[in-house]
Amino acid sequence: MNRKNSSIITIVILCLVAVFCIQCNADKPARLIDRHALVTRHNIEWNDLDGQIPLGNGEFCFNVDGTGLQTFGGNTMAHWAWHSFPLPEGVTKDQIPSTGTFQNGRNTGPDIFPEGTSAIRQYMFDNPHSFNLGRIRLVKSDGQSVATEQIQNLSRTMDLWTGIQTSSFSVEGKPVQVETCVDPSADMVSIRIESPLFENGELGIAIDFPYPAIQRNKPWVGNFKRTEGNSTIRMNDQRSDKRADFRREIDDVVYYTTLNWSDGGILKAPVESEPNTWRLEANSVSSMQFTCAFSSNPLKKSLPGVQETEQANKEHWPAFWEKGGVIDLSESKDERWEELERRIVLSQYLTAVQSAGSYPPAEVGLMGIDSWRGQFHMEMIWWHLAHYALWDRWEMADSALTIYERFIPTARELAQQLGYKGFQWQKSASPGGRTAPWEGNQVLIWKQPHPIFFAELDYRLHPTNETLEKWAEIIEGTAEYMADYPVRDQQTGIFHLDPVMPPSEQGVTKDDIFDLAYWKWGLQQAQLWRERMGAERNSHWDEVIQNLAELPVKDGLYLHSPEWEDTYTERNWEHPNTVGVLGMLPPQKDMDFDTAHRSLLKVWETWQWKRCWGWDFPWTAMAAARLGEPKMAVDALLLDAGTKNHYDERGVCTGGPCPYLPGNGGLLYAVAMMAAGWDGAPDRNAPGFPDDGSWVVKWEGLKPAP
């Protein structure tokens, strides 16, 4: 073989190898982002003794203060932990309506509460409620908590890449080091603590259990002094030197706690005056390691130790950050890039530790209890969970979204009681499916199409027959109710949403703009779902779609409703309903781009942003992105609106009456959409960001929005 032929063969082989490599990597986009550097530059460094950082696994959350424990504040919460107070005196169980409402028959206005039912109404509002499973705190030799003035030189870091929080400080001049983490797959906290103060008995650990209480803005939730209806029973031999199993009884609720500790630890039984407080002390050692697990069932098997739990975190959290979407803004010229990137990274962490469990989260997540008693709002589920689809982490939403299947019996019962077909989804709910009473429960209806939206997000990721079957009954029942709810004008043939309370909750009206748009979109998607499954379109649904009232417009601007012409003057606060029409929702045939654009500009000019909620800003950003206002989209996410659009040191949105996770979830949906685009978006990178060079958006692993 001559040299020329040899060279030709070599070139051919190299070309074939190159083609093979390209084919192998066709579905593997180049990794251009250093995810470790991106995440860790936003590690939480918060040297505030009272500041609480949530550590969790999506189902269970252990909130720690500056000591790495719960010495000055912090609750231990789980999605499965619910309690109800005893019934009011003179009230029997059969008097409590299983649906949460006394109303019978179709809606004519706000929910109806008959005279003489105030005690039952209050009971249904308060129960069931989430509760604090227990607290772990640093105490002195006399059992009293360490005082804040005794602690100096605090330095603490929450390492987002490992899930481990480290606190170092001194107590009266002597060092204390605490490492804390939550097991990724068990409802268990792991603590490693070291100090010479343990060796001589000057410091110890208290584990104590409260009776549930409905209290907000307190260091801890619960009544730690109450013993009535509140008992802690040690089930195993008290001579056991490294493990204690407790049965907790709170009225008729039972749960279990297991405490494991290392060599040199001594667990002391409670004193008579504090029967629900146990103390863990060291016996001539300067360090202790212990784990504390919580469960609705007895924990019989051995539990992982501290080292195992730390190693599990060191494997779990890097895997979390390496999977799914990522956005890097570090090359941007706009000086606000770091704050926006911080909010994005920390929102991913916060939702992962609180909003990826067996039930949808409360608005306060698993940080405490809110004014709604820790119950989850069915209209807020979208804001908590929809972003997981765009960040390609759908499995983190899947478990909570089974709530729709679990709630079918109560949703059907509620619809039948009110004279409607199909399933009426609840408002403020708890695991049993009974809705908490409120005047707007039956007429705040924008929660109704949500499961259809979730089904569509699921199908975009998993376009299979299995997905179609998974959502079929839910979509059918949802759409049956949606087609039955509108009232038809016998003279014009127009179907009206009457009565209805818009998302802004500024009263009861009819034909509010967002519900009209969402209603039509939902029914159209339900028809599409039937077609995907080989079924015929439902003729009544088509009749409603074709004859639903038009979106209200005056002077070239969309209105909240045709009855509220003062949309941009007297009602220019709370949620700006008009921006959701072509923002959260994709365009529809009867939406006018120019009208939506003018309405967005009017909202931006006139709205009282300091009287809004945390998710209003990403809601506005979505509309601005779709309507060709990318600079406004970014400005909306970062708008100075006081506490309403503030994200604190740990990244929690403060835009509600409590730490407010719908703001965090909404932010993640909006920025993913702005980076990866949406159906019909301009064909350029990051179409929701300005393309004037001020923002350089690098992203991977995101999915476009509908």
Image: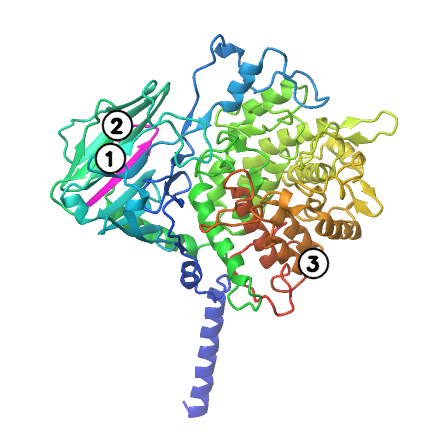
| Residue 108 visible in the shown view | yes
Label 3: few (<14), some or many (≥20) within 10 Å?
many
Indicate which disc residue 259 carries: 1
Please state if 7 lies on the left or on the right of 181 as rendered.
right
Q: Main secondary structure of the magenta part?
A: strand
How far apart are labels 1 and 3 at the CA level?
55 Å
The residue that mark 3 highlights is 629
Please state if 17 lies on the left or on the right of 207 as rendered.
right
Q: Residue at x 59, y 51 (%)?
A: 670
Please state if 539 lies on the left or on the right of 662 as rendered.
right
Which of the image's four quarters has the N terminus? bottom left
Q: Residue at x 20, y 36 (%)?
A: 280
| Residue 464 visible in the shown view | no
User: Where does the image place residue 487, in percent across and percent down from the top left?
Assistant: 77, 26
Q: Amino acid at mark 1?
A: Leu
Name the element at disc 1: strand
Colouring: rainbow
Query: Are dots 2 and 1 in contact, CB under 8 Å?
Result: yes
Q: Amino acid at mark 2?
A: Phe
Query: Are dots 3 and 2 in contact, CB under 8 Å?
Result: no
> Which tag, 2 or 1, sits closer to the chain's start?
2
The residue that mark 2 highlights is 246
Name the residue at the top extreme.
Answer: 90
Up-down relation of residue 10 to residue 585 (above or below)? below
Label 2: few (<14), some or many (≥20) within 10 Å?
some
> Which tag, 3 or 2, sits closer to the chain's start?
2
Question: What is the magenta range?
Answer: 288-299
Q: Residue at x 55, y 26 (%)?
A: 408
User: Where does the image place residue 595, in percent across and percent down from the top left?
Assistant: 79, 50
